[in-house]
Amino acid sequence: MIDLRGVHKAFGSNQVLCGVDLTIETGTSMVIIGGSGIGKSVLLKSVLGLVLPDRGVITLDGQDVTTAPRDAFLARFGMLFQGGALFDSLPVWQNVAFRLLRGALRRPRDEARAIAIEKLRRVGLKADVADRFPAELSGGMQKRVGLARAIAAEPEVIFFDEPTTGLDPIMAGVINDLIREIVTEMGATAMTITHDMSSVRAIADYVAMLHDGVIQWTGPVADLDASSDPYVDQFIHGRATGPIEAVR
Amino acid sequence: MNVAAPLARLGRMVLALMAAIGRIALFAAETISHLFRPPFYGREFANALVQIGWLSLPVVGLTALFTGGALALQIYAGGARFNAESVVPSIVAIGMVRELGPVLGGLMVAARVASSIAAEIGTMKVTEQIDALVTLSTHPMKYLTLPRVLAATLSVPILVAVGDSIGIFGGYLVGITRLDFNPAAYLRNTVDFLELWDILSGLIKGAAFGFIVALMGCYHGMNSGRGAQGVGRATKSAVVSASVMILAANYLLTEVFFAA
């Protein structure tokens, strides 16, 4: 279980998170929605320790993420970055098997390659992609490779940062379905940040709405349309008028 | 007009400079500390050796060749005023191995390598590849910075040694073809006047310059701003700071090695 209590974070005079409280139960898929630049990525990176909160406590299964042994802690996570964040200098299979080629999870090179090709197949890519470089792939293929890398070491927790940004609606649908299938199949805890409502409905068990640095509403995805929360209502219907200012 | 304003501005600049020096010193200390803590990334180190050392050979070699030749012409022209043309081989050799080989080699490597490292790491930062490294349980300083700094520190002295030889050869070519030196006499004068410390001091300078070049490339890359402009600024800062630090370090090392 991931638990955030009173998480604050400011960058200079810009207070991004102002006391976030959120619980993500083990094995569930939580999607955090909210406008662009509202602090969703900061929240996600705070859980991973990529950003240190100014105040508040974040725990994973009761252990404070700031004091947990770093390598063992990170070994439990996989992450799909918004732009893929694939390493340009490495071929696709070495990107996917990055964790399996070094460090505590190191495997023989042949075995790591075989696992990488299996994970590529799992996300719908053929084996001939393995030896290509990220720059030779389309945006959708890069997302799939990023997804394969995120699941390569079979993590307990997977984070998805804007998984469908920059993709056409059909490819976005494919990625959404893949994420849902993989999370269910692996029994992983998932945390996704997005402002794409089709992703929300495809991926989420639970939804949390982040606005003004706090969680404005949280509940099961089935309750989203009937939330009666004015922030959620404006956001999911994409209205320009409402409590959320259109120009931020 | 407030007379204290210029002083306040000067004070802020000095404080900013001190803070930057402090940050670079901490960055260097952290880099060195990873040298003693596993894991080590041998493949990254080998790649860095090829990129920094092997692929810099042509530019360092050509620079040394033309510098050696020009140096021979200059010393000949200057020496002629005192009937001292015969000092050309020894001055070319000493000038190359003590000063011009390491300094010009260091500056050429700074232009080629510091910019490339800063652009590569800066782009990795902007595209979240550095964050991805962390989530994959890999320390960016250990994976990106240490291999490059170590490879530059070890390979630039070798580049300097090669550059010294090519520079002396450039002087030799000009000496025997344009200045009518006897080839055997030119070589004898070169060898007779060159001392081991002349060569070693140049190689030590090369190691220091290599360290500076890679450190500045990595530091500015890791601290790159956002977007293409941020990466461009990081690249420029890496080359400028590495070049200035090489020249400053050269003076300090020369003072330490050769001051009377």
Image (cartoon, grey):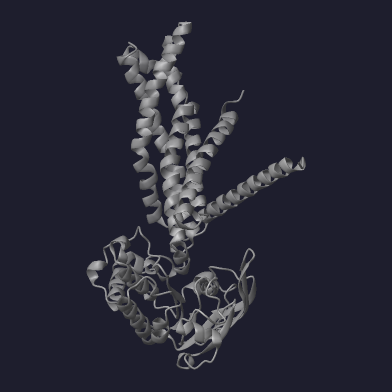
In the depicted structure, whether residue A25 falls above or below residue B31: below
Most foreground residue, A227 or B222: A227
> Percent from the top left, x then y, of residue B260?
62, 23
> Percent from the top left, x then y, of residue B215?
50, 47
The quarter of the rendered structure image containing the N terminus of chain B is: top right
Q: Residue at x 40, y 18 (%)?
A: B72
Left-right relation of B142 to A183: right
Q: Is residue A62 visible?
A: no
> Percent from the top left, x then y, of residue A200?
43, 83
Q: Across the whole image, how many numbered discs are drawn on residues? A: 0
Left-right relation of A126 to A37: left
Most foreground residue, B156 or A169: A169
Most foreground residue, A119 or B11: B11
Q: Residue at x 33, y 77 (%)?
A: A169
In the depicted structure, whether residue B147 falls above or below residue A46: above
Q: Is residue A140 visible?
A: yes
Most foreground residue, B223 or A114: B223
Quadrant of residue B192 within the rendered picture: top left
Identify the residue at the far top of this view. B83
Identify the residue at the far front of this view. A241
> Percent from the top left, x then y, of residue B91?
45, 18
Quadrant of residue B113 within the rendered picture: top left
Q: Residue at x 39, y 73 (%)?
A: A150
In the depicted structure, whether residue A184 falls above or below residue B224: below
